[in-house]
Amino acid sequence: MSTQAELSDDCTTLVHDLARDARSAQRVLARMSDTEKADALHAAAASLRDDAPTILKENAKDIAAGESNGLSKAMLDRLKLDTDRLNGIADAVDAVADLPDPVGQVIDQSTAPTGLKLQRIRIPIGVIGIIYESRPNVTADAASLCVRAGNATILRGGSEAVYSNRAIHAAMVKGLATKGVPEAAVQLMPTQDRAAVGAMLQASGLIDMIVPRGGKGLVARVQSDARVPVLAHLDGINHTYIHDKANPEMARAIALNAKMRRTGICGAMETLLIDSKFPNAADVVGDLIDGGCEVRGDSRARALDKRIGMAGANDWDTEYLDAVVSLKIVDGLDDALDHIARHSSGHTDVIITDDDEAGERFLTEVDSAIVMRNTSSQFADGGEFGLGAEIGIATGRIHARGPVALEGLTTYKWQVRGEGQTRA
Amino acid sequence: MSTQAELSDDCTTLVHDLARDARSAQRVLARMSDTEKADALHAAAASLRDDAPTILKENAKDIAAGESNGLSKAMLDRLKLDTDRLNGIADAVDAVADLPDPVGQVIDQSTAPTGLKLQRIRIPIGVIGIIYESRPNVTADAASLCVRAGNATILRGGSEAVYSNRAIHAAMVKGLATKGVPEAAVQLMPTQDRAAVGAMLQASGLIDMIVPRGGKGLVARVQSDARVPVLAHLDGINHTYIHDKANPEMARAIALNAKMRRTGICGAMETLLIDSKFPNAADVVGDLIDGGCEVRGDSRARALDKRIGMAGANDWDTEYLDAVVSLKIVDGLDDALDHIARHSSGHTDVIITDDDEAGERFLTEVDSAIVMRNTSSQFADGGEFGLGAEIGIATGRIHARGPVALEGLTTYKWQVRGEGQTRA
């Protein structure tokens, strides 16, 4: 019998081998042109459609296992594929193929006093690890974004989707290979052993970046254990501040949309701040409660409507991801800015105001990845931002912030062209 | 007596308190205009000049301690300040003040189909920790770059420069304060306890980025222990490849300069690759040896000159930082690219050639932070690249690569301006 330590050593060896193969494959990918990569991704999309019967058959195994393991209905629904959903996955791969290639873009250029000509050029990051849960579409989404930007990728999906992920991966690799993309450019971890995840997180220098996609538990574990840089999405404790000069109808419509359009997404509003001088606060709150939202307020807020419950100290730091909102009455812009600075998770914060000075101060002084005026935080999304797709929304402060798509999967290098200059 | 664990707990509390104070101070700094920050830095430079007698007196204590602790002459020289050096430090602070403010720059903008107006705006990263050794000028350099880009900073210098660092820090803070920069915006760690360094490295969410500046031991420890993102410089195993179509005189001059101008800097050439078809290899090698360089070659290289020693397997992965170079004969561009892919540390690699196709292939396919044609790797430097200064040269792959100055000390946020849009 193997000990835990032996298993862990085996996983480390495995991950290092996968990563070295990925690095070699990435060198091939890095030399492929825009058109070659686009063609390869279209071939991958076609292959996903061709393999639909196999993929759906494999997906049925995951569903059966999930049912016997007592997965929730919501989990089973996320896991479930049908022809429409699979076509959607293939369409998304085609859409990524049609995005502009970021590789080779000139970021800036200059000529030094020595006559050296300098350019910063966008290049792939290299080898990217994706660690994700349940939804099998991530296999295709993440792989296609990585390939489009010239990166090799090592995918490690959840156990509950293992058959689906294998089938989707096999179809994509087959399609990509017809256009010269090496098999090792898109790899699926061949084991569900959790020690392999640990080995990925430790593979500094072999894996260049890890993107965790899943619940808070997964992301927190990745962030705490990783030696490899992590592009992570943590909380979305998003505020909407209704300024005293807000248009009342706009404020009602935006507050309701920001909370209730979809309560489970990271861009949903979690705390509503209403200025004490805003005259229509009761209408805004009434809309939310009538719409099925539980409102938890401070004592001043509770005077607005009898149906408002009492907010506890934790409510200001809670991401409900549900039909619940915390409500606080604030005294002017500075009070709102102060609350946001203390409680925002740095995802998306919004002001509603017709006052340009207040609006600009809010957009300048709030330090979140996304700051908005007069619109709904539910727009915090790569597609809505015109990025075409997203690998995730980053809540960290370096490399990339907010919705991350192809550019966030690149880095740059300096190209320097001389004519024989030596340094004095 | 305190236990190790108690000391470590004390240091964690200390670092968390410093970081929270830094965060508050950073909010003030983030609201200061270009001119206000520039004025504050000029005041800091003036204060350094005013306090010269004190700073030199304190520096003398470090020198005396260093002498009695048996520091090497080279170390003592790096530590030593005099009026000229101190003026140089103050001049560098003035120069940083005169650099363009990166904060508020619009990176890009677009209008979404919904009519939402999107802009990405450069903003400070936040709180930056700098962990460094011996040279007291880093105290002023790092502090001024951080302030210029609107960041608060926590400086932790080496024990051997503790008096100098305190005096420089005190002078700068005094000058900055006259122009409204809060004292906590530039902090010097008040203890030399190494547990405080550990606490900085673990202060995820409180410190936003760590920049280690020093020898490999320091950088490696920071990289391995940090939970906070690290902007690090590791090895500079830099290659110069003399292609068969290289201009012979240019090749001689560049190879000699790349190795021998200063052998101890990270941009120095460490491996010379000469194409087997390049006719003047013996001249290039002769110049190096005559210039005092030890050359270690493979068997084909050794045929060029009797004075060439035998390279061992480790030589291709060694950063000498000394008058030593490894020399390998390669068969064409692909052979050179392959050697570089296996052995380069990703810092700076150079091709010398008059052939445009080979030159462009090298600049495209070599994956290092800096790739050069027809010039010396010794130009790998923020000043030479026109950045005005540098916080360091980054050899990682994300956030920033190569020489890092003000832009690398910023991140961005998305500003979104709507007119009442809600998401469907």
Image (tube, coloured by chain):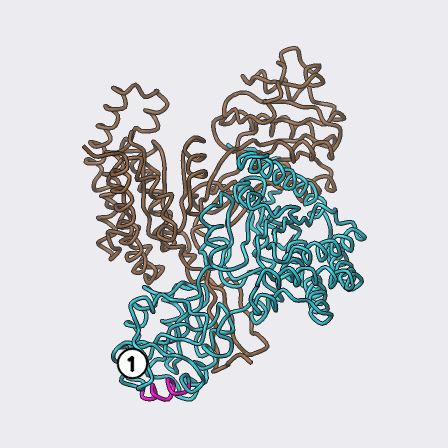
Chain colours: A cyan, B brown
Q: Nearer the viewer, residue A217 or B37?
A: A217
Q: What amino acid type should be assigned to the residue bearing mark 1?
A: Ala
In the image, is residue A281 part of the stretch drawn in magenta?
yes
Q: Position of residue A42 (x, y in %)?
A: 76, 61
Q: Residue at 24%, 24% (x, y): give it.
A: B65
Spot the residue most to the front.
A68
Disc 1 element: helix
Relative to residue A186, is residue B222 depicted above or below? above
Check disc 1 and report the residue beneath it: A301
State the quadrant of the C terminus of chain B.
bottom right
The residue at 66%/48% (across/down) is A152
Q: Is A129 one of the magenta-colored residues?
A: no
Asked if residue B6 can be seen in this view, the reply is: yes
Q: Is residue A313 left or right of residue A138?
A: left
**In which quadrant of the rendered image does the N terminus of chain B lie?**
top left
* Along the viewing direction, whichever of B373 and B108 lies nearer the viewer: B108
Q: Chain of mark 1?
A: A
Provide the major secondary structure of the magenta segment.
helix
Q: Which residues are magenta?
A: A279-287
* Residue A185 location (% of width, % of height): 69, 47
